[in-house]
Image (cartoon, rainbow, N blue to C red):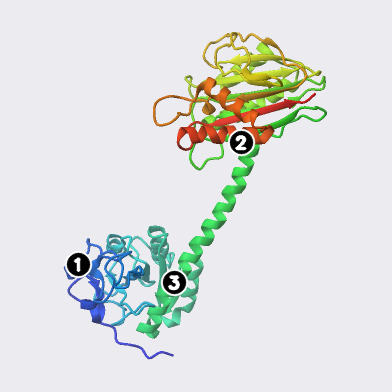
Amino acid sequence: MPVPVPVPRQSAIPAVESGQAQAASSGVDPSLTGSPRKAAAPAGNTAAEPTGQTPATGATGATGSPTPTPTPTLTLLVIEDDPGGSAVVPELLDSAGKPIRVRTARNLTEAERLLTDDVHCILLDLALPTPGRAENDDELAGLRHVLKLAPRHAVLALTASADAERGAEAVRVGAQDYLFRDELDGRLLSRAIRYAVERKRSDTAERRLAEGRLRAQENRRLERGLLPTPLLEGSSLRFAARYRPGRSRALLGGDFYDTVRTPDGTVHAMIGDVCGHGPDEAALGVELRIAWRALTLAGLCGDQLLGTLQQVLEHERSDDEIFATLCTVDIAPDGRRAGLCLAGHPAPLVARPGRPAELLPYDNNGPALGLLPGARWPRTQVDLGAEWSLMLYTDGLIEGRVGEGRERLGQDGMVELVRRQLSEGLRGEELLRATVNEARDLNGGELTDDVAVLLLDRTA
């Protein structure tokens, strides 16, 4: 058992920055003494480094090689109930042999003022009186308050050797370790501080990893709702799609698409875009996509289908100003003909052997869903031929800039881009990937709007 070391007393100052026996060489700013509202000098500050320490990160020595970054000085906040002093021994050293800075507070109010970002560990006396706590109430109320106040800090509990059960309970509640007051010495406390800080870092990393896994699982479930599996069993058409949300670090956007084959052999494809980029717009896009699939499988198409979707939009949107553009295509069982309906959406692109890629007719483009009550959407009959590729897309693909000016890619630029990709022999998924990547490169970076592209191919 370590020999107990006498405890120094501080009777004049209620909450101070104590530099221990080597305060002058430890880098503690003397001006902090007696001023509990001021934090210690930040770790790495040139004025706070002991003599011989490198003053700046990235500096080079006489040989020209980079000088290692100095290890930041550990700072301990002691919350102790003895108004006459602290339970800290005269000298605490970190793993590099540098003095550990120590701050003391008599109560939780003072501790909150001294708990700045440069504090690494908290030593809490479990006997600290907690305001408002009645007799036989929660004995760890003070610890729970500190854990809530400082969720990112390592915490050591200090208790009497006869009260080991309370120390163990403190660890179960959230402290990194507990120490006995009458067995405390500088070496033991220094080691405990380093251990608690590293354990807290490890616990935080493990928690973030677990939270990341849960978010990834949830994101996959959400992505499954937005990016459906096409129902094309029995069809000779080939399907490919690309999706890129405009929101940073998001998997969901306001764009949506779907493809299904009905029992009569007709293949129905749809792509749409809800105005806006937030999670509400993404959720509305999913609702419209699910409604479209259900209505299509129920036998609706064309103007009747779009009119019903508008009713769904009007009931589900959070604001009367929200609207959605939509493009639907129904391809006959023989694959040579298609019906096209446009609700404020860009016309699809079709590519056929021996002919340059071009846009399908868009003269009968109706209004976007949610703009005009009682609107109508004409259905245009299109001859596709025996062999073709049909590309549906959202405006995020064509609204990117070209170079540093204000010029946009536009539909004409996209058509030329796809023509070039086709001439290079790209098809299917490769064609979509190359098209989206080139549009992004022309924009000089990521496209700010959501991008969805769908491709159906029919070979002779």
Residue 97 occupies quadrant: bottom left
| Residue bearing mark 2 | 433
The reply to whether callout 3 and callout 2 are in contact (CB within 8 Å) is no
Q: Position of residue 24 (x, y in %)?
A: 20, 77
Residue sitting at 45 percent across and 29 percent down?
A: 402
Q: Quadrant of the N terminus?
A: bottom left
Lateral position of residue 267 relative to residue 18, left or right: right
Q: What's the amino acid at mark 2?
A: Arg
- The crowd level at tag 1 (other Cα within 10 Å; few <14, some 14-19, many 20+) is some
- The crowd level at tag 2 (other Cα within 10 Å; few <14, some 14-19, many 20+) is some
Residue 95 visible (yes or no):
yes
Q: What's the amino acid at mark 3?
A: Ala
Q: What's the amino acid at mark 1?
A: Leu
Q: Quadrant of the C terminus?
A: top right
**Front residue (pair 414, 340):** 414
Residue 414 occupies quadrant: top right
| Residue bearing mark 3 | 196
Name which of mark 3 and mark 2 comes first in the sequence.
Answer: 3
Q: Position of residue 391 (x, y in %)?
A: 64, 25
The reply to whether callout 1 and callout 2 are in contact (CB within 8 Å) is no
Instruction: Tell me the distance, in whole angstroms, between the alpha carbons under discs 1 and 3.
Output: 26 Å
Instruction: Tell me the distance, in whole angstroms, between the alpha carbons under discs 3 and 2.
Output: 49 Å
- In the rendered view, would you say 246 is above or below 140? above
| Residue bearing mark 1 | 32
Name which of mark 1 and mark 3 comes first in the sequence.
Answer: 1
Residue sitting at 40 percent across and 31 percent down?
A: 404
Q: Which element carries disc 1, helix, strand or loop?
A: helix
Residue 184 visible (yes or no):
no
Count of marks placed on residues: 3
Lateral position of residue 47 relative to residue 439, left or right: left
Instruction: Tell me the distance, in whole angstroms, between the alpha carbons under discs 1 and 2.
Output: 60 Å
Front disc: 3 or 2: 2
